[in-house]
Image (cartoon, rainbow, N blue to C red):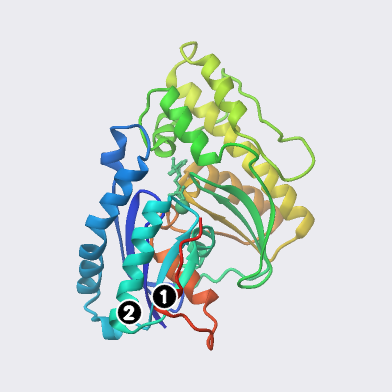
Amino acid sequence: MRILAIESSCDDTAVAIVEDGWRVLVSKVASQEKIHARFGGVVPEVAAREHIQALYPLVDSVLRQAQLRPKDIDALAVTVGPGLLGSLMVGVNGASALAYLWKKPIIPVDHMKGHFYSAFLGEGRSPILPALALIVSGGHTELVLVRKHGDYQYLGGTIDDAAGEAFDKAARLLGLGYPGGPAISRAAGGGERVGSVVSLPRPMMDRKGLDMSFSGLKTALARQVGAYAKGQLAAEFQRAVVDVLVEKTMAAVKSLRPKSVILAGGVAANDFLRGELEQRLLAEGFPFFVAERKYCTDNAAMIGAAAYWEYRPGRKYEWYNAKVKI
Ligand code: KG4
Ligand code: ZN
């Protein structure tokens, strides 16, 4: 099954063609990063306008690069939420119009489930279910158990800021620019534990349960700005966030004993987090899956994968049924 997927929930316009839930024929992202960097964060109204400009030229260029025509596509898929209302509307309306014109089914996809399925992209990787997933993005930070396709159970997550949001705010405090995750990780260098002089708290890490909190960490960091070198502060901040994420994930893994563990979402592009979690899981004997970095941050290939795994033959996927759900 060949799916053309569209993702526009935040500030990236993305289009991809994915076969059978794992083979990416083409995946393109038109980033608005430079435009929003001027404001230090995403401006929703600006994002929606940029999506309008970018969407159809991107669909064209993806089809051309894949050397395919609309008749070669079996279905469309589109992110219906969660995300910015205006941004989502551009994607959903744009995709629905194509579904009408091309007479194709359109599969609505939840953005977070899209992140989950990023781990299924690429040859020879098919995480076995039940899978436990840590999904860490700019808007969400959650642990979910996926027993079978379409059956998601929320186990716990942040009670305030998302991990990616914490990275973005910390980077702003340190004057490192936007988006914050990659900037902090660059400033932190390897993120080694040796020689660390700064010490930040690990909020809620030793508490029972799977909830987390990251907003206090940012306040603690603010108090230390100026007292230490930026690189040291960035490294300790990254360590603190990663320690909490890894401890909570390991607690969930040990009690639920899933068949595989998935790391997904923009923050999953973080090398230190990938390395630390992989090491702990290998030591405990749990298979670990994380997408290539380019499929961790927002993209449409993951939406095409999710659509494939959630598609139910026999169900109606009419062009007028895809609705924004924030
Ligand atoms: O999944 P995503 O692209 O968009 C949302 O759905 O939110 O995630 C974006 C978030 C941003 O907060 C960004 O700072 C963070 O992911 N991020 C990272 C890294 N790359 C992106 N955080 C830590 N380290 C990175 N290398
Ligand atoms: Zn995302």
> Does residue 190 appear in the picture of this structure?
no
Say what secondary structure mark 2 lies in: helix
Question: For mark 2, what is the residue?
Answer: 100
CA gap between label 1 and label 2 equals 8 Å
Say what secondary structure mark 1 lies in: helix
Q: Position of residue 12 (x, y in %)?
A: 34, 52
Q: Is residue 280 left or right of residue 303?
A: right
Which residue type does callout 1 highlight? Answer: Tyr
**Crowding at label 2, few (<14), some or many (≥20) Cα neighbours within 10 Å?**
some
Q: Nearer the viewer, residue 160 or 226?
A: 160
Q: Nearer the viewer, residue 54 or 118?
A: 54
Q: Position of residue 188 (x, y in %)?
A: 45, 30
* Residue located 43% across and 50% down the image: 84
Q: Quadrant of residue 168?
A: top left
Q: Quadrant of the N terminus?
A: bottom left
In this view, the residue farthest toward the front is 320
Sequence order check: which comes first, mark 1 or mark 2?
Answer: 2
Q: Is residue 179 above or below residue 137?
A: above
**Crowding at label 1, few (<14), some or many (≥20) Cα neighbours within 10 Å?**
few
Which residue type does callout 2 highlight? Answer: Tyr
Q: Is residue 18 left or right of residue 66?
A: right
Q: Nearer the viewer, residue 199 or 79?
A: 79
Under 8 Å from ligand 2: the CB of mark 2?
no
Q: Position of residue 272 (x, y in %)?
A: 51, 41
Q: Position of residue 235 (x, y in %)?
A: 50, 28
Q: Is residue 273 left or right of residue 318?
A: right
Q: Which mark is residue 320?
A: 1
